Image (spheres, grey):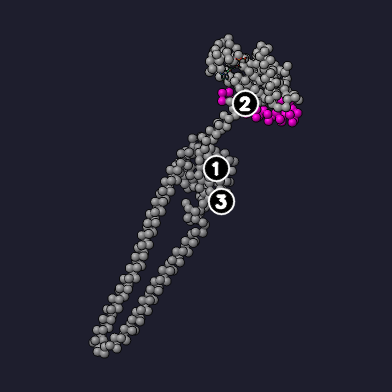
Amino acid sequence: MGNGAPGSVSTAARGGAALLRLAANKALLVALVYLLLGMVWILWSDRVVEALFEDAVQLTRAQTWKGWLYVAATAVLLYAVLYRLLRDEATHRLRQQRQREDLDLLNQFRESIIDNANIWLNVLDAQARITVWNKAAEQISGYRREEVIGGDAVWEWLYPDPDYRADIARRVRAILDEGAEVEGFETHIRCKDGQVKTMAWNQRRFFDERGQVGSIAIGQDITERKRLQEELERMAVHDPLTGLYNRREFELLAARRFADCVEAGHPYSLLWVDIDEFKAVNDRFGHQVGDEVLCGVAGVLQAVVGGQGIAARYGGDELVVALPAVALPEARALGEIVRQRVQAARLLADCDADAALTVSIGAAQRDAAMHDLMALASAADAAMYRAKAGGRNRVCGPA
Ligand SMILES: Nc1nc2c(ncn2[C@@H]2O[C@H](COP(=O)(O)OP(=O)(O)OP(=O)(O)O)[C@@H](O)[C@H]2O)c(=O)[nH]1
């Protein structure tokens, strides 16, 4: 896999032909120089020998010596030329062999990096078929390379939903056809064992040494990171014990709905729920039981009003429910249902069959004098204290 541009094939072929032409021209030049030197030698040496020797026997001997001299000189010349050519050729071959060895080493190194990288790495050809599938891809997906290499069936396995798969296929085509790049793109894959994992992808196009288009994808399994992130987000807005919204989130959400209701002229009510004699529960049965009771009351509250309002743990044993667009009579009725259900739940039955656990509830509705959520909350809190003062286990409204 490389980054060569398309057309590199014809460039290489043109380069090879030019080199061959250069070699042929050089050889022709050497042959012509040899021919010329030979002709000059024969013409010149014949004249010199004929001028020097008149005797036929001496002339023949001189011609023979001249022949030997020519053969010796051309042999030396031939040796020098061939030695240079063959030495250059040998050096060239040696260099090529070293380059091939270096390239092999580099390829082995690259393959080992691809294979042992801690991240999913796969390569696709122009038809989106898998050509490289590293160990991390095998480990994360559960699919072995023998199952996926050369085909595109893996997309159906990883993305069984046809619409989702079509969307991803469109993105891959955009990468292959238009050179689009993705960075940090998240998908949910279904692994061989049925697990669903969240992956973050970086993917881009490349051209191999033959100019063929492909795409390389690097994937990171972010399932655990996502889960932790969601858990942190959940913890930031929820009370860890009861699972209801925490006070901060309640004030944020309820205030937002309060402003909406003021603007729309809708009613807005609030229930303030406090467990009766909760300190005695802790003292008699222990903090652990107290925690379970708190959770039990929160469960009742969520079941009765969760769909209509915003239920939260305000602090200690105090729970609140904001009821946007709900008028006081309905709010009181809901409070009454909560009270009865808490009592009926017999949350202390396991500790003491006779011990009853009850709640006191204050209900209030926004009036023209209440400009913010806190004013309404104070009114509901005051109503809850009236319920306590009235003997507990009851729902009280405004005085
Ligand atoms: N188990 C448990 N107890 C808690 C928690 N938070 C606060 N409490 C206890 O809740 C009790 C609240 O008592 P109060 O509301 O003051 O009084 P009470 O006993 O409920 O009496 P009334 O409200 O007058 O009926 C205290 O004893 C706190 O220690 C908690 O998260 N778990």
- Residue at 35% x, 81% y is 39
- Can see residue 151? no
Secondary structure beneath label 2: helix
Would you identify the image quadrant in which residue 54 lies?
bottom left
Measure the alpha-carbon separation of dots 2 and 3.
50 Å
Badge 1 local density, few (<14 within 10 Å), some, or many (20+)? Answer: few
Mark 1 vs ligand 1: CB below 8 Å: no
Identify the residue position indicated by label 2 in the image.
247
Residue 123 circle label: none
- Residue 98, percent across and down? 37, 56
Taking the view exactly as shown, the residue that stands out farthest to the top is 354
- Residue 275 versus residue 94: which sits nearer the camera? 275
Q: Is residue 227 above or below residue 4?
A: above
Is 117 a magenta residue?
Answer: no
Q: Which residues are magenta?
A: 240-268
Compared with 359, 187 (above or below) is below
The image quadrant of residue 242 is: top right
Residue carrying label 1: 184
* Amino acid at circle 2: Arg
Q: Please tell me which residue is depicted at 76% across the width and 25% down the height of the picture.
A: 368
- Which comes before the other along the chain, label 3 or label 1? 3
Q: Nearer the viewer, mark 2 or mark 1?
A: 2
Identify the residue at image location x=70%, y=27%: 372
Amino acid marked by disc 1: Gly
Assign a secondary structure to mark 1: strand
Above/below status of 44 relative to 75: below
Mark 3 lies on residue = 179
Is the magenta region chiefly helix, strand or loop? helix
> Mark 2, residues whose alpha carbon is within 10 Å: few (<14), some, or many (≥20)?
some
